Image: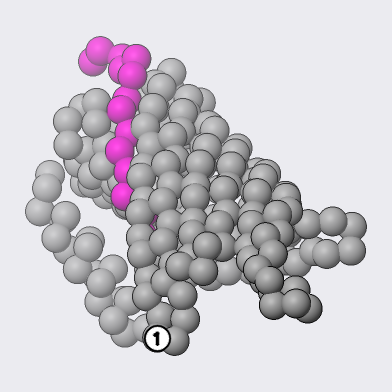
Amino acid sequence: MQKKNLLLAAFILFFSVVANAQIEKGNWLLGGSFSYGTTNYQNSPSYSNAGISPHIGYAIGKNSVLGLNFLIGFSETAAQNKSFNLYTNAVYKKFFPIKEKFGMYLQLNAGLGLSRNSYYNFDSSGASVKTTYNSHTYLAGALPGFYYRVTPGILLNVDCGGLAYNYTEQDANNWSSGFTFNFLSNFTFGVDFILGRKKS
């Protein structure tokens, strides 16, 4: 916990030297993020995943944005277990400027995800059998983050994990649900382009 607090303090201290960014009503925000990762576990199959997440938003007020996020993701293990995911979320994002170019935001989202999954197991004869199934997920969450305004029209941002709830159903008799809290332990980097800025 102490390391997380130090990281947060360092983030704020580093950017406090830049001299309040504002998103005006009527602005459009267009952007996205990309993620890729591989993980190797001892005595377990390696795991890799990739995803692209475009989004669009409209400023309904000063520093307040409503929008849609999309996620297309793919994951695979060395054992050839695969998953293809498609998610869409309605989003409300509130920006809190700290300095001219730097600030924080809180993102609230709720949406639906669809997945197609496949895995291999062995039948009674020892033969490898492929099983494929579809599932759908309902999800909601609160996600804090930081942004840095590189130019009047470009924002760099980093999501810092947060609180999320999901309910996943494969069929009427096979479902799961749960909360996830990963603040300051899961980061996603992205960029926003601000369009339709009003001239001062």
Residue density around tag 1, few if under 14, some if 14–19, many if 20 or more, within 10 Å: few
Q: Secondary structure at mark 1?
A: loop
Residue ID at (39%, 21%): 27
Image x and y of residue 160, in percent:
38, 60
The one of 135 and 58 positioned closer to us in this rendering: 135
Residue farthest to the right?
A: 172
Which residue in the protein does label 1 denote?
42
Magenta-highlighted residues: 187-200
Image x and y of residue 33, in percent:
36, 42
> Is 64 left, or right, of 110 in this rendering?
left
Image x and y of residue 14, in percent:
14, 60
Establish if 72 lies above or below 178: above
Residue 49 picture quarter: bottom left
Question: Amino acid type of disc 1?
Answer: Gln
The one of 142 and 88 positioned closer to us in this rendering: 88
> Is 47 left, or right, of 158 in this rendering?
right
Residue ID at (33%, 19%): 195
> Is 98 left, or right, of 111 in this rendering?
left
Establish if 35 lies above or below 191: below
